[in-house]
């Protein structure tokens, strides 16, 4: 809400208005990732697109999502909007899957690109994307992201 913007929120607004897509990271993932997508529709929606195409599922852990202090503060002030953490779009970050054997290469990529790459979950044989708390309990949310159709 525009009238409620605090000074800490200005950086968040700037990041939303002027995102920095990971254009160089995408090509670097070609021999590492088994699948990837940008997070433009929301994390759960976009990992869902990958899972649908692969006939797989995923378990995503909320406590593993890299969330800035400013976003945590915003969620504390507006808990009804917390679902944007997993369902909000327009982030233009990259979500990707990779075999466990590629972990060192992923660590190297993070160093090479000076960017945070965070493991937020894992692929499963189920045909569903589950958002879970740190204990593995499913977080039931009607929000998964933008639906094109």
Image: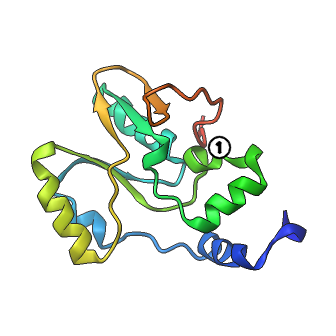
Q: Residue furthest right?
A: 3
Residue occupying the point 16% across, 68% down: 108
Residue occupying the point 71% across, 72% down: 9
Residue 26: where, in percent of width, then height?
Answer: 29, 64
Residue 31 visible in this rendered orientation of the protein: no
Q: Residue furthest left?
A: 101
Quadrant where the N terminus lies? bottom right
Residue occupying the point 44% across, 70% down: 21
Quadrant where the C terminus lies? top right
Residue occupying the point 38% across, 69% down: 22
In this rendering, position of residue 117 left or right of residue 15: left
Residue 5 against residue 135 in the figure, above or below: below
Q: Residue furthest top?
A: 126
Residue hosting label 1: 83
In this picture the colour scheme is rainbow
In this rendering, position of residue 107 left or right of residue 121: left
Residue 33 visible in this rendered orientation of the protein: yes
Residue 114 against residue 145 in the figure, above or below: below
* Viewer-side residue, 70 vs 58: 70
* Viewer-side residue, 51 vs 11: 11
Tell me the SS state at disc 1. loop
Residue 98 against residue 13 in the figure, above or below: above
The local crowd at label 1, few if under 14, some if 14 to 19, many if 20 or more residues have their Cα within 10 Å, is some
Residue 47: where, in percent of width, then height?
Answer: 41, 41
Residue 39: where, in percent of width, then height?
Answer: 47, 53
Residue 52 against residue 46 in the figure, above or below: above
Q: Residue furthest front?
A: 135
């Amino acid at each position: 809400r525009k009238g409620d913007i605090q000074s800490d929120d200005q950086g968040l607004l700037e990041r939303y208005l002027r995102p920095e897509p990971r254009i160089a990271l995408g090509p670097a993932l070609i021999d590492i990732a088994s699948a990837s997508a940008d997070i433009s529709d929301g994390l759960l929606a976009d990992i869902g697109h990958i899972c649908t195409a692969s006939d797989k599922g995923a378990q995503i852990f909320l406590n593993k999502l890299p969330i800035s202090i400013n976003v945590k503060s915003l969620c504390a002030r507006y808990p009804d909007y917390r679902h944007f953490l997993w369902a909000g779009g327009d982030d233009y970050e990259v979500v990707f899957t990779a075999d466990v054997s590629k972990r060192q290469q992923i660590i190297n990529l993070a160093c090479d690109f000076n960017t945070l790459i965070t493991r937020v979950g894992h692929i499963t044989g189920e045909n569903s994307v589950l958002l879970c708390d740190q204990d593995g309990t499913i977080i039931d949310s009607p929000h998964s992201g933008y639906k094109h159709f």
